[in-house]
Amino acid sequence: MVRWATSADNHNVPNECAEHVMANVAPETYSTAIGEDGLRRIGFDQTGRLIEVISIDLGEEELVIHVMPYNPQPRTRRTS
């Protein structure tokens, strides 16, 4: 069973797209921003868009906490 945190909707990626990636991509372990052990999947949704899905395994369910289009380019920090 999958539950969705409100944070999973921040980037306007439909749940169906994330579910497609979750069903077709094996997860890798991932350390979340708050230090939780998470699961990370990066894959193409049914429309061909590359997205990242991060979730936490809660035993009988998986809590999706982050979904967004994935850009493989390294982020650069802005300096003021």
Image (tube, rainbow, N blue to C red):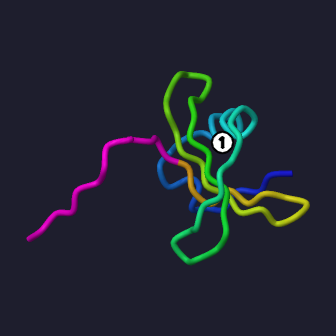
Name the side, left or right, on which 73 lies relative to 18.
left
Q: Is residue 63 magenta?
A: no
Name the side, left or right, on which 47 lies relative to 69.
right
Q: x, y (%) of residue 1? A: 86, 51
Location of the C terminus (image quadrant): bottom left
Q: x, y (%) of residue 51? A: 52, 39
Q: x, y (%) of residue 46? A: 62, 23
The chief SS type of the magenta part is loop
Name the side, left or right, on which 73 lies relative to 2.
left
Residue at 56% across / 41% down in the picture? 42
Name the side, left or right, on which 31 lies relative to 19.
left
The span shown in magenta is: 68-80
Q: Is residue 75 above or below residue 80?
A: above
Residue at 66% across / 42% down in the picture? 15
Within 10 Å of the Cα at label 1, are there few (<14), some (14-19), or many (20+) other Cα atoms? few
Farthest residue in the top direction? 47
